[in-house]
Image (cartoon, rainbow, N blue to C red):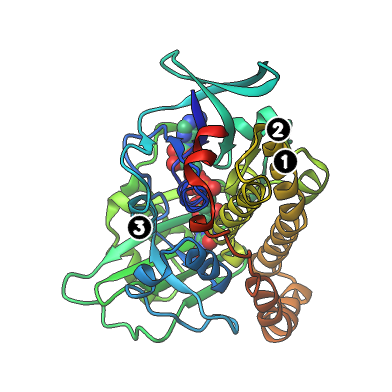
Amino acid sequence: MEEVVIVGAGIAGLATAVALKKVGVRALILERSKELRATGAALGLFPNAWVALDKLGVSDKLAALYAPFERNGAQPRAVHRKVLLEVLAEELPPNSIRFSSKITSIETQVEQGSPICIVTLDDGSIIKSKVVIGCDGVHSIVARWLGLRPPVYSGRSAVRGLSVFPKGHGYDQSHGIHQFVDVGKRAGFITLNDKEVYWFFGATCPPKGLEKGADPEMIQREVIENLAKDFPSVFLDVVKHSDLSSLTWAPLMFRYPWNILFGKLARSNVTVAGDAMHPMTPDLGQGGCSALEDAVVLGRHLGDSISKHGKLVTQDIGFAMERYAKERRLRAATLITASYLSGWVQQDGSSRLMKFLRDVVFYKLLLARVVNSITEYDCGKLPSVSSLPSRESESSI
Ligand SMILES: Cc1cc2nc3c(=O)[nH]c(=O)nc-3n(C[C@H](O)[C@H](O)[C@H](O)COP(=O)(O)OP(=O)(O)OC[C@H]3O[C@@H](n4cnc5c(N)ncnc54)[C@H](O)[C@@H]3O)c2cc1C
């Protein structure tokens, strides 16, 4: 019997475990992969993510490694995914993550008057827990169990990669993102340090060859010789320098915002966070940032419950989860909508009207305001654990 089981050791799962540790609750993370998965190479973290990372106690470590750059009026930093995951994992007690543990189903039952979650793994073993938090990504089993409608395909896909220049890339590191837009296509790259560059390419087409298993050489060839062949040589040169093991090509999925507004985000002692709750297109770089927000908000509500009762009372966990779901609903739906519209204006359509909307209305008048308003979000403070009777709270949930 576990106290809290978190499904998935991605950004959401690890950050949630760190937030729970900070309010005196220990969680077991079940991860289907053999090790931390850093799919996507790198990501941009906006100010809202840094507020959350600060609450989790890891912002200084990361900020020391990556410089901020200017992006539509905000100051994000591009961060290696692997480093972000490792920094979060380092905060956890030993044996907090159990790798090669894929969950296949979840159910709940009542034992001695309290709801208990039963999680089944693909090797047939069963783990009982008082709480389950699904951080299992876009195709979340936990979200399905909650009754959330499956995510939908946006009609677009994105290739991401990390390029390495052993002798230095020579790009101006203070430049921020180098972006290239064409009809139905958008690409960009950003330096991570003086030798590594993160790049992405998005297009209105499905990923190719996934059914045969992703072949990185095919992905690289497809971008250089076909999809991005008309893009500036500076971008193609970056793609040529790719570390093949970092290349991925994924369909861009999102959940309809009304499914978040009206769907069940928590049921009994089970809830979801990160992409499991709110998969969104990456056009505003907010999926990972909002997963970090989720972690702090969930930790805050469970922590507040401990503060109120002096310990985490089993019957109160459901209320804490409802409060968390209520707080996240509108925020998540807004981010999904803003991201989708941003992608639509930037990439879809070749008409003059679309070009006018993109180049004049969106880039010049709207984008900075949208980015500022969504990235100024403050996810709140975690209650201080030193003021809590932590032993009692651990044993009583
Ligand atoms: C092209 C692209 C660019 C992006 N750029 C940005 C950006 O710049 N900034 C930003 O903030 N976000 C960005 N995002 C979004 C970001 O990548 C995601 O929102 C983020 O990774 C979500 O983290 P997560 O932990 O919720 O899910 P995931 O990272 O998907 O982690 C889920 C974890 O759960 C595990 N898992 C799944 N199923 C099971 C199971 N049944 N049992 C056990 N374990 C399981 C998986 O192995 C995985 O480790 C981008 C996304 C894309 C596609």
Asked if 212 appears above or below 224 in the picture, the reply is: above
Residue linked to disc 1: 265
Instruction: Classify mark 1: helix, strand or loop.
Output: loop
- Give the foreground label among 2 and 1: 2
Do the residues bearing badges 2 and 3 touch, measured as CB atoms within 8 Å? no
- In this view, the residue in front, 91 or 144, is 91
Residue 304 position within the rendered picture, expressed as x and y whole percent measured from the top left = 65, 52
Residue drawn at x 58%, y 49% as measured from the top left: 274
Disc 3: CA contacts within 10 A as few (<14), some (14-19) or many (>=20): some
Residue drawn at x 37%, y 48% as measured from the top left: 92
Residue linked to disc 2: 315
Asked if 279 appears above or below 122 in the picture, the reply is: below
- In this view, the residue in front, 271 or 200, is 271
Disc 2 and disc 1: Cα gap in Å? 18 Å
Disc 2: CA contacts within 10 A as few (<14), some (14-19) or many (>=20): some
> Left or right of 336: which side holds 292?
left
Instruction: Classify mark 2: helix, strand or loop.
Output: helix
Disc 3 and disc 1: Cα gap in Å? 28 Å
Residue 117 position within the rendered picture, expressed as x and y whole percent measured from the top left = 60, 24
Residue linked to disc 3: 87
- Say the numbered circle drawn on residue 27: none
Disc 1: CA contacts within 10 A as few (<14), some (14-19) or many (>=20): many
Instruction: Classify mark 3: helix, strand or loop.
Output: helix
* Identity, as a three-letter code, of the amino acid under mark 1: Leu
**Mark 1 CB near ligand 1 (8 Å cut):** no
Residue drawn at x 56%, y 33% as measured from the top left: 396
